[in-house]
């Protein structure tokens, strides 16, 4: 049975994230969103609050918290700004948790411990210029050469590309299987920023998440030690899908934080703005829009909590996580659109935050699996074309 009461530890993590959002993100987010720059105080503040590894076991430098804590922190960080939640999604969901689950002990000590302590930043390199939803369409290759692999290719739309120290990168190691689009020819590697042949570049002019770093990564004959192969050759696709389960979970929870931000901004404004001699909070159609935000928040939260409950027990949660991501992002996009409508002409200006919410919300229906991909996934589960199976290894079971 799912218990909706939060534990003291879960509330502690929520409050830590809330404090960072209120003291570090919110006071300056308009400035950094306008300038399209990452707040340099964000990573130090998150590290000091133990937010960069709080759901990693203590033996690897974390606090040993659970997935519900991760969801709560994601909500609070996105309440501040989507760019801050992205840090949790990428550094923890797409990098640290996969390393915890799939890497060997030597790799964990070298590449997980510094990340959990906030000393190093990790990110995830799967998407390419011509490969997003079509994962096996990626073109990067890693050819074995003695005790190294020679990595070539390009990654695109990579969050934290210019600031990460470590990259979890996916590439074809079996070129024959690449020709046949057989995903068992894809492998995963941990790559370090300062290796020769690796370069990154930022992407500017984004519609939303402007205060976050997004970029491209180019690999030109990068020598990757064979010791940095994660798990085994041919396991990259499986690892990537596991990564997406964790990343999508944080996006779902974060989207609920955005809905809450839309709701709170509207409630405040509705008691400040008058039309036809009364507060707009008294107008029925305004009430309808705010009520829809509340409803979206409540069932979006229920969905991500169900996924977190499964994760806490080491159970596959791909179906539940996909549904949570799809619905929460859909509701966040609708809530942001309604928030702009409530604010009227002022909602069309960045003088108020709802304009930023509207731009940020759109991205979540694209990244971590488009809404179309999740729609098809849910239909395939219903029709029986798709089923979740336990992985060939134990999933982390964390403190609750």
Image: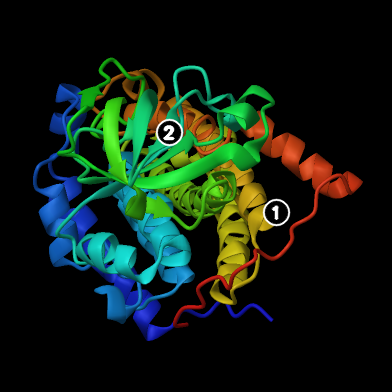
Please report whichever mark, 1 or 2, sits nearer to the chain's N-terminal start. Answer: 2
Q: Secondary structure at mark 1?
A: helix
Q: Secondary structure at mark 2?
A: strand
Position in image of residue 9 (x %, y %): 35, 81
Q: Quadrant of the N terminus?
A: bottom right
- Judge whether 142 appears above or below 246 on screen: above
Q: Is residue 46 left or right of residue 64?
A: left
Residue 159, percent across and down? 32, 36
Q: Would you identify the image quadrant in which residue 279 lies?
A: top left
Whether residue 156 is visible to the viewer of this picture, yes or no, is yes
Disc 2 marks which residue?
A: 143
> Where does residue 59 sit, x and y in percent of width and height?
29, 80
Of 332 and 188, nearer the camera is 188
Q: Which mark is residue 196?
A: none
Decide if residue 132 is on the left or right side of residue 254: right
Quadrant for residue 160, please give it.
top left
| Residue 319 badge | 1
Q: Residue at x 26, y 69 (%)?
A: 109
């Amino acid at each position: 049975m799912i218990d909706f009461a939060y534990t003291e530890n879960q509330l502690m993590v929520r409050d830590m994230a809330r404090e960072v959002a209120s003291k570090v993100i919110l006071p300056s987010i308009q400035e950094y969103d306008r300038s399209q720059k990452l707040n340099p105080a964000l990573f130090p503040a998150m590290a000091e609050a133990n937010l960069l590894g709080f759901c990693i076991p203590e033996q690897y430098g974390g606090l040993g918290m659970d997935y519900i804590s991760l969801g709560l922190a994601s909500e609070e960080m996105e309440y501040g700004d989507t760019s801050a939640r992205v840090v949790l999604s990428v550094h923890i969901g797409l990098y640290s948790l996969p390393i915890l689950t799939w890497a060997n002990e030597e790799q964990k000590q070298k590449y997980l411990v510094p990340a959990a302590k906030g000393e190093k930043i990790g990110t995830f390199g799967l998407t390419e210029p011509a490969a997003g939803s079509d994962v096996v369409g990626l073109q990067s290759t890693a050819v074995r050469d003695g005790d190294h692999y020679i990595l070539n290719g390009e990654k695109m739309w990579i969050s934290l590309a210019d600031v990460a120290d470590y990259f979890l990168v996916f590439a074809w190691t079996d070129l024959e299987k690449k020709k046949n689009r057989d995903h068992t020819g894809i492998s995963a590697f941990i790559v370090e920023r300062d290796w020769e042949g690796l370069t990154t570049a930022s992407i500017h002019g984004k519609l939303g998440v402007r205060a976050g770093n997004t970029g491209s990564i180019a690999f030109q004959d990068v020598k990757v030690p064979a010791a940095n192969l994660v798990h085994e050759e041919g396991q990259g696709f499986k690892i990537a899908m596991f990564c997406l389960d964790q990343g999508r979970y944080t996006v779902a929870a974060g989207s609920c934080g955005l809905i809450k931000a839309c709701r709170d901004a509207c409630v405040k404004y509705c008691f400040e703005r008058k039309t036809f001699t009364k507060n707009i909070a008294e107008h029925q159609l305004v009430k309808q829009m705010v009520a829809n935000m509340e409803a979206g928040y409540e069932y979006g939260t229920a969905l991500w909590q169900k996924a977190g409950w499964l994760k806490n027990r080491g159970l596959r949660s791909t179906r539940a996580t996909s549904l949570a991501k799809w619905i929460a992002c859909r509701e966040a996009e609708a809530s942001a659109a309604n928030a702009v409508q409530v604010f009227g002409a002022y909602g069309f200006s960045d003088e108020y935050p709802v304009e930023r919410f509207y731009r940020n919300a759109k991205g979540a229906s694209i990244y971590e699996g488009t809404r179309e991909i999740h729609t098809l996934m849910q239909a395939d589960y219903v029709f029986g074309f798709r089923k979740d199976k336990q992985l060939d290894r134990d999933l982390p079971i964390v403190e609750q």
